[in-house]
Amino acid sequence: MTVKVNGIELTDAQMEQELPLHSAAEHPVQSAMTALVLSRVLLDEAARLGISGADDEATIEALLEQETSAPVADEATCRRYYEQHPDRYTVGRLLEVDHILFQVTPRVDLNALRSLAQDTLNQLIAEPALFAEKARALSNCPSGAVGGSLGQLTRGDTVPEFERVVFAMQENQLLPRLLETRYGLHIVRVNRRVEGRLQPYDTVASGIALALAATSRDTAWKQYLKLLVGRAHIEGMDLLGADSLLVQ
């Protein structure tokens, strides 16, 4: 379907140029078209306000700098963030983790997979010593060959939804529920936990200030873009929620 923004049709040539930038997206074509639409909306607004730059990217940057503002986090805010998120500023923390993966694939019977995973978990709650045996027999992860061992994990080694759960677990703990991630269902056990050390506030203060400033800026940009999208005349595409794609 033809997509137009304020009466201007987006071309196949533009799509061919944009598409490679979205190859990792879940829906690359939709993601690329959304980016083109949002870019067009911003460039149109820049033209209306007489704002220009060396290229389209510079023009959009100049528009956002002129038309949006974001509060700057003061020291009290930065220190409060530090105190509320100690895990983010702890270094040297590691876990030794075992897991059994029941992988979700396009043709898998999800009800049967969940039932098998839950039955296995129930058995392991009753008899933890069977973990390695069950991992070798059932896990869809290569770690199954070594009894489910993932070795030593630090922050950033696994997907966020897995990391959030396992780093909140205690040493010698079997998670009493199935852990769901983008890969499937996991039975997880933490065998060893090394706590690491919390970095002093002064060491990380500048990084916290930069992170909070970026978050504040991104929020302001999204709000502004949402306003512009609401004013624009867009044909051939529904941009509900697409303002979240503004931040690169």
Image (cartoon, rainbow, N blue to C red):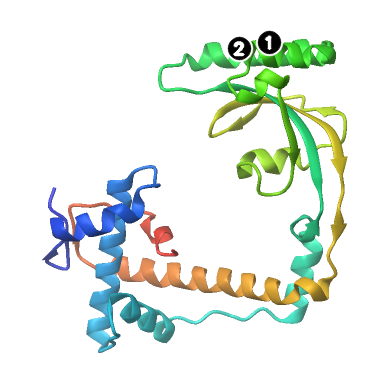
SS class, disc 2 = helix
Q: Residue at x 61, y 24 (%)?
A: 142
Q: Residue drawn 33% across and 51% down?
A: 31
Q: Is residue 163 above or below residue 172?
A: below
Q: Residues within 10 Å of mark 1 (few under 14, many from 20)?
A: few
Q: Residue at x 60, y 75 (%)?
A: 213
Toward which corner of the image does residue 16 lie, by quadrant? Answer: bottom left
Q: State which quadrant residue 33 falls in.
A: bottom left
Q: Are marks 2 and 1 in contact (CB under 8 Å)?
A: yes
Residue 152, position in %: x, y?
A: 76, 39
Q: Nearer the viewer, residue 155 or 117?
A: 155
The image position of residue 66, as x and y in percent, is: 40, 86
Q: In the image, is 184 to the left or to the right of 83?
A: left
Q: Mark 2 Cα within 10 Å, few/some/many (few <14, many 20+)? A: few
Residue 47 is marked as none
Badge 1 element: helix
Q: Position of residue 99 (x, y in %)?
A: 70, 26
Q: Is residue 9 left or right of residue 68?
A: left
Mark 1 belongs to which amino acid?
Answer: Asp
Which residue matches tag 1? 119
Q: Nearer the viewer, residue 245 or 6?
A: 245
Residue 200 visible in the current orientation: yes
Q: CA distance from mark 2 to mark 1?
A: 6 Å
Q: Which residue is mark 2?
A: 115
Three-letter code, disc 2: Ser
Q: Position of residue 62 (x, y in %)?
A: 37, 84
Relative to 219, 210 lies left or right: right
